[in-house]
């Protein structure tokens, strides 16, 4: 079974993806990490984040293990990710990696922005996960505070809106829900409620 999970930042899509992968004993790929690592690598190499050829070259040689999770999770890495993610050649360079992960025997869970629409349109189950921007900002601020990098909620709302806009309006594989995705608005849901709703949807599909 291939499960495609797309949605906005801090909507809970990553948590849902990990829980579904554990539940069905499937491998999981956080595809955002690929774009984050490409952005971080470009910054480390002092490459302009709009230089399509140079960023695509970095993406094609990406070694994820070189980038500690803490470095990938910063707000700066997220912004860099969304800039390089707008470059079609970067997306092309990362496509095969994601596609072959999705097509492995037994299936997989992938989360990102374009899994159900571009990377794996034939996925057996698709989710679109979103939440109100204020709630997403609150969650992300809590995470950053725990990591010792506090940022005001007001600044976070601004950052999320900017990132959503860039991801939605880019020409290459814009962030959007697949027509056949099951929509989960997690604004007032706990992670347990989200997984319960997702599992109910999956069993209703296979029934
Ligand atoms: O999900 P995460 O916040 O880690 O993603 C970082 C950025 O990578 C997103 O803002 C988006 O621009 C890009 N991305 C993408 N397609 C994906 C996954 C992430 O464009 N499948």
Image (cartoon, helix red, strand yellow):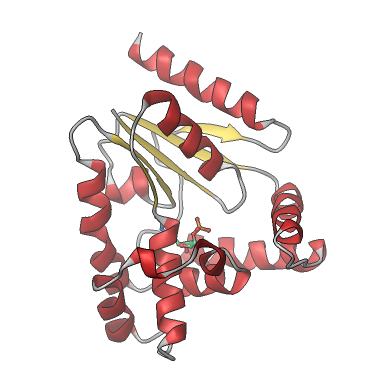
In the rendered image, the residue lying farthest to the top is: 207
- Asked whether residue 21 appears in the rendered view, the answer is yes
Q: In front: 55, or 118?
A: 55
**Which quarter of the rendered picture does the C terminus lie within?**
top left
Q: How many marks?
A: 0
Residue found 46% across the figure and 67% down from its top: 36
| Residue 10 placement, left or right of 121 | right
Instruction: Establish if 193 lies above or below 91.
Output: above
| Residue 6 placement, left or right of 51 | right
Corner quadrant of residue 25: top left
Instruction: Establish if 96 lies above or below 6.
Output: below
Residue 90 coordinates in the image, percent (x, y): 31, 71
Residue 162 coordinates in the image, percent (x, y): 62, 68
| Residue 143 placement, left or right of 22 | right
| Residue 51 placement, left or right of 98 | right
Corner quadrant of residue 65: bottom left
Residue found 46% across the figure and 49% down from its top: 176
Residue found 30% across the figure and 70% down from its top: 62
Residue 91 coordinates in the image, percent (x, y): 31, 66
**Which quarter of the rendered picture does the N terminus lie within?**
top left
Q: In front: 33, or 121?
A: 33
Residue found 74% across the figure and 47% down from its top: 135
Q: In front: 178, or 101?
A: 101
Corner quadrant of residue 174: bottom left
- Asked whether residue 85 appears in the rendered view, the answer is no
Residue 8 coordinates in the image, percent (x, y): 56, 51
Q: In front: 171, or 38?
A: 38
Instruction: Establish if 56 lies above or below 98.
Output: below
């Amino acid at each position: 079974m291939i499960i495609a999970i797309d949605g906005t930042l801090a909507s809970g899509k990553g948590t849902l993806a990990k829980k579904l992968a554990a539940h069905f004993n499937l491998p999981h790929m956080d595809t955002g990490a690929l774009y984050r690592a490409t952005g971080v690598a470009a910054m480390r190499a002092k490459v302009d984040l709009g230089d399509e050829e140079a960023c695509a070259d970095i993406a094609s040689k990406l070694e994820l293990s070189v980038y500690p999770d803490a470095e990938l999770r910063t707000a700066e890495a997220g912004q860099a990710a969304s800039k390089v993610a707008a470059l079609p050649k970067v997306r092309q360079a990362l496509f095969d990696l994601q596609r072959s992960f999705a097509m492995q025997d037994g299936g997989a869970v992938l989360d990102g922005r374009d899994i159900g629409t571009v990377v794996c349109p034939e996925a057996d189950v698709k989710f679109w996960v979103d939440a109100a921007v204020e709630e997403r900002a609150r969650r992300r601020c809590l995470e950053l505070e725990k990591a010792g990098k506090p940022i005001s909620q007001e600044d976070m709302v601004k950052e999320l809106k900017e990132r959503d806009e860039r991801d939605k309006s880019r020409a290459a594989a814009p962030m959007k829900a697949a027509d056949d995705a099951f929509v989960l608005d997690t604004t007032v849901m706990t992670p347990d409620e989200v997984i319960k709703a997702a599992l109910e949807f999956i069993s209703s599909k296979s029934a």
